[in-house]
Amino acid sequence: KNQVEQSPQSLIILEGKNCTLQCNYTVSPFSNLRWYKQDTGRGPVSLTIMTFSENTKSNGRYTATLDADTKQSSLHITASQLSDSASYICVVSAGNFNKFYFGSGTKLNVKP
Amino acid sequence: DTEVTQTPKHLVMGMTNKKSLKCEQHMGHRAMYWYKQKAKKPPELMFVYSYEKLSINESVPSRFSPECPNSSLLNLHLHALQPEDSALYLCASSQSGSEAYGYTFGSGTRLTVV
């Protein structure tokens, strides 16, 4: 069964600290993996997109890693800011045409 | 233009009303999607249009009727909705057949059915 699981469900950190969010998937055949940031009541915004051959990709303070062998990805946020408070969603695309699998997201709360 | 634009941003409608949600993109994407998202849940796929033809319908009730008039526009016609249909409706687009890049979401329409 194609699934995407994220952990933790929620996370509270202090401003300026780093954190790492996890995404494990069983989607097959794998096409690519995306991390999105979603503010409450808004549409998801893409942070990174990774294909099978990519291990690491950065976007400012966001760094995503992908281990296609273990089917795991992580999103590392460096020097967190209050504006990082949001839900972070992992989305895995299967080789099937236009099929995407969503994780349930990690709710991050950055406190001053 | 690298955006997916959704209108209206907010909509309140009665159960007997007929309304439409609109989605527009000018990135040349040939696949467009409708998602429904309830609070604290991930988006759930409703419909996929590819090259202006409906390719996926995830068993959505007929009170939701999608329409793709051209490659840049996607509508969702609403009729006789129920209060449980209240949700954030998201539109997305992508380069059809090339999922690696360009999968972009709109900001959503917050729908409340009263």
Image (cartoon, coloured by chain):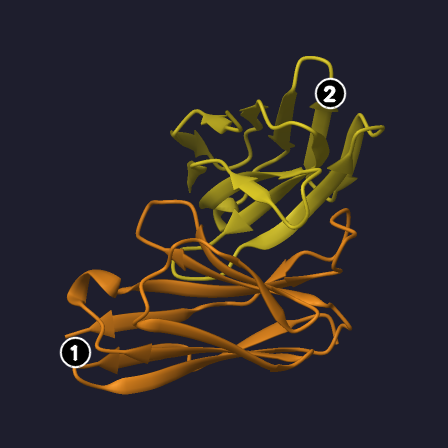
Query: Within the image, what quadrant is residue A81 found in?
Result: top right
In the rendered structure, the answer to whether residue A96 lies left or right of residue B36 reads right
Q: Which chain is orange?
A: B
In the rendered structure, the answer to whether residue B105 lies left or right of residue B7 reads right
**Crowdedness of circle 1 by 10 Å Cα count: few (<14), some, many (20+)?**
some
User: What SS does tag 2 mark?
Assistant: loop
Q: Quadrant of the N terminus of chain B?
A: bottom right
Callout 1 amino acid: Met
User: What SS does tag 1 mark?
Assistant: loop
Between A19 and B35, the residue placed more toward the observer is B35
Alpha carbons under labels 1 and 2: distance apart: 47 Å
Q: Quadrant of the C terminus of chain B?
A: bottom left
Residue A48, image x and y in percent? Answer: 70, 43
Query: Label 2, on which residue?
Result: A68
Palette colour of chain A: yellow
Between A88 and B46, the residue placed more toward the observer is B46
Residue B66, image x and y in percent? Answer: 46, 74
Residue A97, image x and y in percent? Answer: 68, 48
Q: Is B12 situated above or below A85?
A: below
Query: Label 1, on which residue?
Result: B15
Q: What residue is shown at x 74% (from left), y 49% (from top)?
A: B99
Query: Within the image, what quadrant is residue B109 found in?
Result: bottom left
Q: Chain of mark 1?
A: B
Q: Is B30 situated above or below A62?
A: below
**Crowdedness of circle 2 by 10 Å Cα count: few (<14), some, many (20+)?**
some
Query: Within the image, what quadrant is residue B89 found in?
Result: bottom left
Q: What residue is shown at x 74% (from left), y 57% (from top)?
A: B102
